[in-house]
Amino acid sequence: MNVIEQRLSEMGLVLPPPLVPPAGVVLPFRMVRVLGNRALISGHGPQNADGTLGFFGRVGADVSTEMAYQAAQATALSILASLKRELGSLERISRWGRIFGMVASAPGFSLQPHVINGFSDLIIALFGEEVGQHSRTAIGMAELPFGICVEIEGEVELVD
Amino acid sequence: MNVIEQRLSEMGLVLPPPLVPPAGVVLPFRMVRVLGNRALISGHGPQNADGTLGFFGRVGADVSTEMAYQAAQATALSILASLKRELGSLERISRWGRIFGMVASAPGFSLQPHVINGFSDLIIALFGEEVGQHSRTAIGMAELPFGICVEIEGEVELVD
Amino acid sequence: MNVIEQRLSEMGLVLPPPLVPPAGVVLPFRMVRVLGNRALISGHGPQNADGTLGFFGRVGADVSTEMAYQAAQATALSILASLKRELGSLERISRWGRIFGMVASAPGFSLQPHVINGFSDLIIALFGEEVGQHSRTAIGMAELPFGICVEIEGEVELVD
């Protein structure tokens, strides 16, 4: 077990299985697309332990800011799981790059950065300040697929 | 005529002319910006045969999911047309990369992935699984420019 | 003083100090993340001269299109200030790349391109057509952090 997965284990966190999409949904794209030393990460949502999507609703109405923080952390785990499947090992990540965090927001909810901190805090705790740092945007969406409350896409740099 | 354009022709599809923006609109940027072996694709919308924008309204209210699928396919044609004008030939695309699909969504509409499949299905049919695959995000927007129902931006890798 | 900063000065424009976030807000990421010859720019908003965020409200309701154009120009200044702090000099920018402009939009407001022109016009005036050109997307958001009316993220290419 490598360092990142050891840290995850020590934190009591588990990577989810591949996404089980809602019935009848076809997703004809890759969760991670590698181009040279870049891994482009598709929009991911929070998953349950069985691989299905979880954490539905709008933040500021159906979902609290604290619960949405947990959803952003769960989305980080989904992304890490996809990266591990595509790359073989999370040790191939040399530096985190761009993170784009989307929060399904009730009218007037404007604490999207608090929510996406659930992602950033975990990634920096796991990878450290040097590798784990990233650029970031956090915004409020009208609607996210299937009613999830958080979706995150991004990019990491790979060891040559 | 190259392979991609031959396939388009066999499918009865035609690339649109350059965008004719609404009256009084100045768009002081490039539809495609090439940096090294990357072509960065500006947000494109669906065009009519005369180059103007089409497919207006919100999906889930004014526009059906099926019609929005067609709008996403039309947006793929707009993007291919811009890439051909900038690159000279679509054969210069070595791999598709990041695709970011935005759907103007009525409250409660959450089938954005179904809509953006109109883009993904066409690109994979034209370029094949290896070259045409991509990372993807599909989300619901409050508003899109001029009231179009779909807008897509992204990035492709070019042959060195 | 280099050419870009001289032009800014001639235009009577001043780069703002580092962002002073709202009370209690932790932003655990970098405003600019450099990966190789790419500078990835986090989502920035318009700042006041004291570093705090400004230009609050929704365009099309609380904020006019012309005021939002000014907000997009102010956001360009925030981005230039972050790039200067991270890179040491704005002369290290060899070419502008992807620009992603987000406008907090009242229902029915669809002139996002007019708003984001406040960014594009300034960058092209400062850097010229060759270096300053960029790909661009301009869209309407349900909510932006802390109620700002414009947020912009993007990427520039650096001199090797």
Image: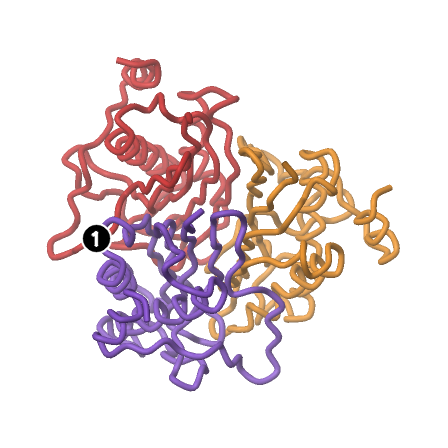
Chain colours: A purple, B orange, C red
Q: Nearer the viewer, residue A21 or B150?
A: A21
Left or right position of C74 against B90 = left
Residue B127 at x, y percent in the picture: 73, 54
| Residue at 46%, 26% in the rendered image | C132
**Does residue A109 appear in this view?**
no
Q: Is C27 displayed left or right of C59 in the figure?
A: left
Image position, residue B38 (x, y; %): 56, 40
- Residue visible at 35% across and 50% down in the picture: A95
**Which residue is at the front of the view, B118 or B5?**
B5
Residue ID at (53%, 79%): A21
Give me the chain letter of mark 1. Answer: C
Quadrant of the frame with the N terminus of chain C: top left
Percent of width and height locating residue A18: 48, 77
Which residue is drawn at the image coordinates 21% and 31% (left, top)?
C16
**Which residue is more in the foreground, C62 or C38?**
C38
B54 on left or right of A15: right
Residue B62 against residue C40 in the figure, above or below: below
Image quadrant in which the C terminus of chain C is located: top left
Q: Position of residue C99 (x, y in %)?
A: 45, 40
Taking A111 as reference, is A136 above or below it? above
Q: Is residue C17 above or below residue B16?
A: above
Amino acid of disc 1:
Leu
Residue receiving disc 1 = C27
